[in-house]
Image: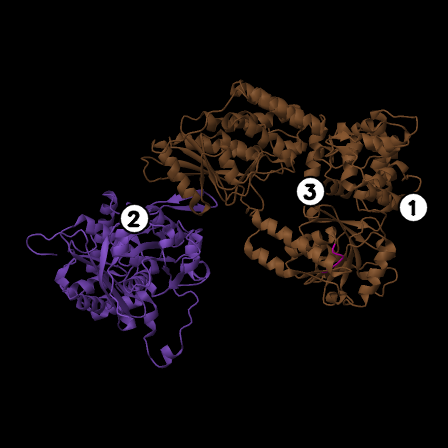
Amino acid sequence: MPREVRDVVFVDGVRTPFGKAGGMYANTRADDLVIRCIRELLRRNPQLPPERVEEVAIAATTQIGDQGLTIGRTAALLAGLPKTVPGFAIDRMCAGAMTAVTTVASGIAVGAYDVAIAGGVEHMGRHPMGEGVDPNPRIIAEKLVDPSALVMGSTAENLHDRVPHITKQRTDAFALASQQKTAKAYANGKLQDDLVPVAIRDEENGWGLATVDEAPRDTSMEKLATLKTPFRPHGKVTAGNAAGLNDGATASLLADEATARELGLPVAMRLVSYGFVGVEPEVMGVGPIPSTEKALRIAGLTIDDIGLFELNEAFAVQVLAFLDHFGIADDDPRVNPWGGAIAIGHPLASSGVRLMTQLARQFAEHPEVRYGLTAMCIGIGMGGTVIWENPHWTAQEGGDK
Amino acid sequence: MSLTAPNEVVTRALLRQVNVPGLDRPAALITLDNGFDHTKPNTFGPGGLTSLDEAISAALAADPAFIAVTGKPYIFCVGADITGLPQLADREQALEIGRLGHRVFARLKDSSVPTFAFVNGAAMGGGLELALHCHYRTLSAGAAALALPEVSLGLIPGWGGTQLLPNLIGIPAATQVIIQNPLMQNKMLKPKQAAELGIADVLLEPADFLERSLEWAAGVVRGQVEVTRPEVDKDMWAGVLYFARQTLDQRLHGAVPAAYQALDLLETAKDADFATGTAAEDEALADLVFSEELRSGLYAFDLVQRRAKRPAGAPDKGLARPVTKVGIVGAGLMASQLALLFARRLQVPVVLTDLDQARVDKGVGYVHTQIEKAVSKGRMDKGTAAKLYGLVSGSVDKSVFADADLVIEAVFEDLNVKKQVWAELEKIVKPEAVLATNTSSLSITEMAAELEHPERVVGFHFFNPVAVLPLLEIVRGERTDDATLATAFAVGKQLKKSSVLVKDAPAFVVNRLLTRFLGTVFAAVDAGTPLEVANRALDPLGLPMRPLALLQLVGPAVAYHVGGTLHAAFPDRFGVSENLKRIADSGQPIVVDDEINAEVAKLLVVGDQPLTEEQVRQNALDALAQEIRLMLDEGVVAEAQDIDLCMILGAGWPFHLGGVTPYLDRTGTSERVTGRRFLPRGAASLAG
C-alpha cells in the first residue's frame, strides 16, 4: 500500500512547576502530576473532542509504584479521557518525554492515528535515581562499560577530563547565566503560561498550590565557587553547575497537520527531523553532538540554519562541549534564552517536552527564525535531538534563519 | 474560652497563603484536618472551633484576596463532635456551644473579604453549615455525601443551618434536607443533587478539584465569573411548612421534638434577621441537648455505628470457613430474594432447588428480572449483571449441593418438613458444609437433633424485604459449634447485614417482641376496644407504623402462626386470638388507605370491656418491659443493647426511643413492671 508521510505538528505543551526532591511535592503522587498536565492540555484546547486523542505516551525512568502500571494508560483513564483511548509507558531516561514525542509523531506521520498526547514524569523524591536497578554483572566482568557510567555526575567529571579546556570557572559562569536568564524570564512573564498549578498538601500546613518552580535560586560566582564536588575530590561538577534532583511532569499535544487545521487547533511547531545516537556511556554528556549532526543530516540542514536552541542543561560542561563543537559562544542569545535545567530543574523523563514547549513560545516571538532544535544527553551514553520548523516564520530580507 | 472537651479529637484549621495565578496578592487557604485519615472524619468541638477562629484572624490579618476553607482528603467536615454533648454540665454550657459555633462561623459570613468553601468531600451537619456561611461554595463531584442529619439524632442544625439553607435554596428543598431526609433512614444528598438544589454554586470534577476551585474563586474575585442564584420564593413559605407539619403529625404525632423545633426555626428564617434566627437556634439546641430524645438518639447512633459492626458474643473471625458456593432449598419468593442477595454480595455460585422444574424456573426467573430492573434503573452495570446471571442457577436435583459450603433452607415453616429437608441434604453435602435455616420461630436445636453433624446447623433469620432491612439474627443452637457460628458471622458481614447473636429461643428477638406487643393490642380488641382506638394507642411513641398496619405488613396468617409457636412456648403470656384467625382466614386487608377496613371490623367477635388508648398503650409497654426482662434473664441476647439494636435495625423502631429500652426506662415502665431499669441512668438518658 503506497502511503505518504504526513506532517506532524506540536500543538501545545504544559508542565507542572518543577519541585525539588523532598520539597513541595513530597506528598504528591507522580501520576497525579502528569494527570494534571493531561487534563490541562484538554482544557486549554476545547476544540479537541477528547475521543479524538488516539494515543497517550507517558515516559518515566523508574517505572515502579506511582510511575508504574503502564502509566500512559492509567494516567489517561485517571485524567478522564474516554476508555477507548489507549496509552503506554515509555523510557529513555532523560529523553523519555522527547522519545514519547518522536514515537507518537512517527505514528502520526505514517497515519496510525491523528492526534496523540506525549509527556513524561519523574518524581525523584519518591523514586531516587537508581531505585531498584540490577545491572548485569557482565558490565563489570567483561569491562563493557566503565562502572562510573551509571553515576551521571561521574560521567560529567569524565567529560571534563576529555575537554580540559572547559574550566570550572566557565561552567560556573554558564550556570550563573542560566539562573539569571530564568529569573529574567519569570520577571517578564515568559514561563508562567506553560505552568499548570498543582494542589499540594502537607500535614502541618494543609493544602497549598504550587505555581512556580522551586529550584531557581539567587547565586553568584563566589557562592558557586564554594560548593562541594560530590562526584570526585577536587573535581569540577557541583550542585551549582548541574541540574538538581527534581519532581515534575509535562505533557504535549501532537497532531497530523491537516487534522490540527480541521479541528482548529493551534500549530506551534512543525516536526522536521529527529535523531538519537549512542556514545560511550562513561561520557554520556557528548551524546547531543552526534544526535544533532544526524538530525541535521536527515533534515538537509546545517547548524547555521538553526535560529534557536533549547538544550537540556543536565551539566554545564555537557552544554559547553556541544557549543564548542558547533562553534557557538557560551552566551549566544539563541541558546536557552530563558535559562535551562540548571535553574528550572530536570525531572528526568519529563524534561524533553519542557524544551519543546519553551521553543514553541520562542518561535511565536521570533517569526524571523525558521528552524530551532531541542537536544539532550541521555544516561548510558546517548544523545537525542529534534529539529522543528517555526510555522510563524516569514521570509525576511537577509536570510531565512 | 470556658468550654473544653477533654476527649476532643481537635480538627485543626491549618492556614496557608497561596498565590493564585491572576491575583495580585495571596489568598488564604484554610484546611480542616484532625490529623487522621478519612476513616476518622473531621468534626468540630470547642478546640476545633477555636482553631478555626484563630485561623480566620490570622488570614484576615494578611489582607488576603479571598479566604477559602477546605477539608482533608475525602472529608470536608462531618459536623459537631456529638460525643461531647452528654458531658455538658448544664443548659448554659449547651447555649455556649451553640453561640461559639455561631460566632466563629459568622466571621465567614460577615467578612468583607470574599469567603469560599471548597467542599472537597463529605460535609454534614456543622461542616455543611460552615460551608453555608461562606459567600460562595464549590463542590466536588466525588464528595461522598452532604446532609444536615441532626434531626435524625434529636438535634437541629443549630449552627445557622435552619436560617441559611432556606434562604439559599428555598423552603421546600430546605425542609426536605433538614426534616424529611433525616427522618427517612437519614437519607443523604449526592453532590449532583446538592448542586441541583443550589447548595453549591459550581460542581467540579474531583481530579483537579482544588486547583479548579482556586481558579474559580479567583475568577469570582476578579469579576470574571458571575454567580447567579435563583431568587427564593417567600410566598410559599407558610404553605410548605403547614404541609410539612401535617405530614409530621401524621407520622410522628409529636414524638420527635427536634423535628418540630426545626419547623419552628424554618418559620423564623422567613423574616427574622440572622441574629434573631441564630439566637433562636441557640435556645432550641440547648433545650434539645437536655432532652431525653437526644440522649436516646445518641445511644442509638452509637449502637448502629459501633455495636452493629462488632457483634457481641461472635466467635473468633479466624475460625470462619470460606464460602465459595451457596445452596438454597426452595425457590419461592423468600428463596429467590436470598439467592439474589447471596450472589450479589458473595459473588459466588448460588443454586436454587425446588420440587419441580416450573418452580425452579420461576425462582431463577425472579432473580433475572430483578437484575434486569437494576440495570435498567442504572443501579447495576452490565458487567456485574452478566456475572450475576452466570452465578444464579436452579435445579430439581439436590445433588447440586454436593460442593456447596453453605446451604440455606427457605421451605415451609414446619419443623417436620425442615427436619426432612436436612436429613435428605446430609447425605449429599460435605460434612463441614454449614446448614442454615431461615426459620422465623422454630427451634434450631430440634431441627438439628437427628443429624449426624448437628454442630453445623445455624439460624439465619432475615427480615423482609431482605435486600433492604439491615438486621440478621444469627441463632446458635445448643450444639452449633464455633466454626459454624464464625462462618455465619463472616457471611453476614459479607452480606452487609448487621448481625446479632441470638440464643435458640422461640421467635428469637424481633418477632417475639413484636408478637407480644401486637398480642396486647389484639387482646384489647378482643375485649371490645374499637379497632380505631387500639390502632391509635401507640401514636405518642412515633413508631414507623401503627400496630394494625404492621400486622398487615407481616401478614395476619404469619402473625397467627408465629403467635401459635409462642403460645405453645409461653401460654401465659402469649394468647391466641380467634379474631386474628378470622382476619387471616378472610384474606381481607385490615387497613385500606390508612383507614380500618369496615368489612374486617364486621368479622370480629368481641367482648364488652373496651380499653382507652392510654390503657392499651400501657398494657403494650408493660408487656414489652416484662418480655425484655425475661429475655435478658434467659440469655436470649447478651445485653439490652442487643435488644435495642434488633428493634432499630429489624423493626425500624426509632432513634428517639433508643430502640425501646431507653424509652421504657425513662417512662418508668421498666422499674414499675420489673423492679429495675434496663440501662443505668445517663447511658441512654439524662443523668439526673
With B31 as the anchor, is A153 left or right in this view? Answer: left
Q: Hey, what amino acid is under mark 3?
A: Val
Q: Hey, what amino acid is under mark 1?
A: Ala
Quarter of image, res B573 = top right
Specify whether residue B660 is painted magenta.
no
- Within 10 Å of the Cα at label 2, are there few (<14), some (14-19), or many (20+) other Cα atoms? some
Residue at x 84% of width, y 39% of height: B586
Q: Which chain's residue wears label 1? A: B
Location of the C terminus of chain B by quadrant is top right
Q: Are marks 1 and 2 on the same chain?
A: no
Q: Are marks 3 and 2 on the same chain?
A: no
Examine the rendered structure and indicate whether residue B17 appears above or below residue B481.
above
Label 1 and label 2: CA atoms lie apart by 83 Å
Q: Secondary structure at mark 1?
A: helix
Q: Is residue B55 visible?
A: yes
Label 3 and label 2: CA atoms lie apart by 52 Å
Task: Decide which of A60, B627 is in the foreground and name it.
Answer: B627
Label 3 and label 1: CA atoms lie apart by 33 Å
Q: Are marks 3 and 1 on the same chain?
A: yes
Q: Return the residue found at the far bottom.
A: A142
- Residue B568 disc label: 1
Q: Which chain's residue wears label 2? A: A
Quarter of image, res A324 = bottom left
Magenta region: which residues?
A: B327-331
Which residue carries the number 2 mark? A194
Nearest to the eye among marks 1 and 2: give it.
Answer: 1
Which residue carries the number 3 mark? B304
Q: What is chain A's hue in the picture? A: purple
- Measured as percent of width and height from the top left, residue A270 is found at 22, 57
